[in-house]
Amino acid sequence: MSTVPKISSKFIDKLSHAEIQKVIEVCKAVNIDQPNWLLAVMFFETARTFSPSIRNGIGSVGLIQFTRDKKGVEYKTIAGRKYYLDELAQMSFIEQMDVVKAYLKQALRTKPKSFVDVYLSVFFPVAQGKSDDYVFQTSGLSAELIAKQNPIFDRNKDKKILKKEVEDYFREVYNKWGFDFDNEIKGGSKTPAYAIIAVFFYSVLAMYSAIS
């Protein structure tokens, strides 16, 4: 049974048809089943604007907030190419989506199973595919330091972040923004193609009945 991507109307309202099609194209290229997952990441990272030029307080820029490689340089290296942050900021949405694709091709460690896995490819790649009780830490960064730097995710203020807390944060935020997080953002559902055809058929039938 063939299926088609299910995209939130709230995202569709903010983007052109060509931009939506570009997101779908990129998702297929990097093996993301649901365009909503990538759209939700970019919606959050751009403060709900989908602006490719938006910057945050530390100078990160664009649709997934590309960050400089290290202090003292003004570029992000992706697949061996240096992208200067000012260059990224001058790109259109569609142009920058090609850079997003290049980034995700190297950052996604496994096929994403959820929105959270796609978000983690941007925020904390090592946590992709881990269980809900996974604690965010590395050999060079303690759980306490990561929690201190990202207090929005430390839901119970116990000085550590669990993967489940990241999902809980986004559920609260997206529901507050008027989404149904579990059905529109988190889930992995697709709309069967036959259902789309049926809706179209009955719409045409209703229109014909109204004018006959």
Image: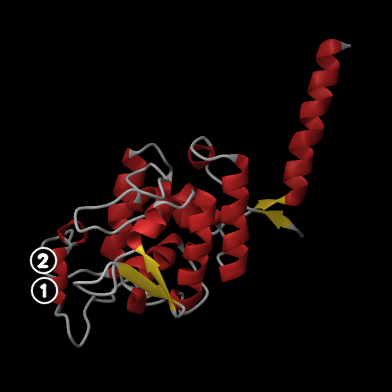
Residue 94 higher or lower than 128, as above or below: above
Query: Residue 187: in sight, yes or no?
Result: no
Percent position of residue 201, x then y? 82, 34
Residue at the extreme right of the image, as rendered: 212
Q: Amino acid at mark 2?
A: Lys
Which of these two is toward me, 206 or 10? 10
> Which residue shows up at 35% across the image and 70% down it?
76
Label 2 Cα neighbours within 10 Å, binned few <14 / some 14-19 / many ≥20: some
Label 2, on which residue? Answer: 148
6 sits left or right of 177 in the view: right
Count the marks: 2
Left or right: 171 in relation to 143: right
Inter-mark Cα distance, 2 to 1: 6 Å
Q: Decide: marks 2, 1 in contact (CB < 8 A)? A: yes
Secondary-structure class at tag 1:
helix
Q: Quadrant of the N terminus?
A: bottom right
Which residue appears farthest toward the bottom when viewing the image?
139
Q: Position of residue 132 (x, y in %)?
A: 33, 71
Using the image, determine if residue 179 lies above or below residue 159.
Answer: above
Between residue 66 and residue 47, name the one nearer to us: 66
Q: Is 98 situated left or right of 127 in this image? A: right
Is the residue 20 above or below the residue 144 in the image?
above
Describe the element under mark 2 as helix, strand or loop.
helix
Residue that mark 1 sits on: 144
| Residue at the (49%, 68%) spot, across then down | 113
| Amino acid of disc 1 | Glu
Q: Is residue 51 left or right of residue 34?
A: left
Q: Quadrant of the C terminus?
A: top right
- In the image shown, does 197 or 126 lie closer to the viewer? 126
Residue 50 at x, y = what percent?
A: 42, 46
Task: Write down the quadrant of residue 207 in the picture.
Answer: top right
Question: Quick one: label 1, few (<14), some, or many (20+) residues within 10 Å?
Answer: some
